[in-house]
């Protein structure tokens, strides 16, 4: 396990996440992810620590309102959120992880989030 640091564009929101140096991510084609270019690195909540910027985060919910999309109110970047697919986990935007500890990022699966209900069973469970 490696501890990765990251955050939003303006630097107000900072976090740490534990994971492999070679990060495997999911690319989703839902309306939010495709428009923002989000790459999901989903981990159990125990592997994520918010270090700063709590007061700069705003939450956006839509549709089923299960997912908690968190954005920096200053720069508008979504560095992490609680995903509908894994409400007990955290989805970190791999593009918001500082590059120093990342050996590589590979897209290992594409998820048809535009047709979420028909494809949710294709996502693997969280691995501790």
Image (tube, rainbow, N blue to C red):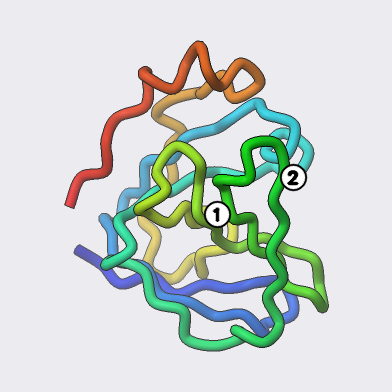
Figure quadrant of residue 76 = bottom right
Image-quadrant location for residue 59: bottom right
- Residue 53 image position (x, y, % from top left): 62, 85
Mark 2 lies on a secondary structure that is helix
Helix, strand or loop at mark 1: strand
Check the image and report above or below for 92 versus 63. below
Outermost residue, top side: 118
Q: Local crowd at mark 1 within 10 Å, few (<14), some, or many (≥20)?
A: many
Q: How many labels were placed on the picture?
A: 2
Residue occupied by mark 1: 93
Quadrant (top left, top right, bottom left, bottom right) of the N terminus: bottom left
Query: Which residue is situated farthest in the front direction here?
Result: 64
Which residue position holds label 2?
36
CA distance separating discs 2 and 1: 10 Å
**Residue at the (64%, 55%) spot, across then down:** 69
Viewer-proximal residue among 2 and 116: 116
Horizontal side of 46 relative to 42 (left or right) equals left
Q: Residues at badges 2 and 1 in contact (C-beta under 8 Å)?
A: no
Q: Please indicate whether residue 38 sits to the left or right of residue 47 in the image.
A: right
Residue at point 32%, 49% (across, down)? 22
Q: Residue at x 37, y 54 (%)?
A: 89
Residue drawn at x 71%, y 82% is 56
Q: Position of residue 73 (x, y in %)?
A: 79, 75
97 is higher (above) or lower (below) than 38: below
Of residue 65 and residue 30, the one placed in the foreground of this image is 65
51 to 23, vertically: above or below: below
Q: Earlier in the sequence, mark 2 or mark 1?
A: 2
Q: Position of residue 27 (x, y in %)?
A: 55, 32
């Amino acid at each position: 396990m490696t501890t990765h640091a990251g955050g939003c564009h303006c630097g107000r929101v900072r976090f740490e996440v534990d994971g492999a140096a070679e990060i495997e991510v999911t690319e989703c084609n839902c309306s939010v992810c495709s428009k923002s270019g989000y790459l999901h690195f989903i981990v159990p909540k125990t592997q994520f620590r918010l270090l700063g910027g709590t007061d700069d985060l705003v939450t956006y919910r839509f549709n089923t309102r299960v997912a908690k999309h968190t954005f920096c109110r200053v720069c508008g970047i979504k560095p992490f959120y609680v995903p509908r697919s894994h409400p007990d986990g955290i989805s970190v935007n791999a593009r918001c992880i500082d590059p120093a500890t990342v050996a590589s990022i590979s897209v290992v699966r594409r998820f048809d989030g535009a047709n979420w209900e028909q494809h949710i069973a294709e996502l693997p469970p969280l691995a501790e």
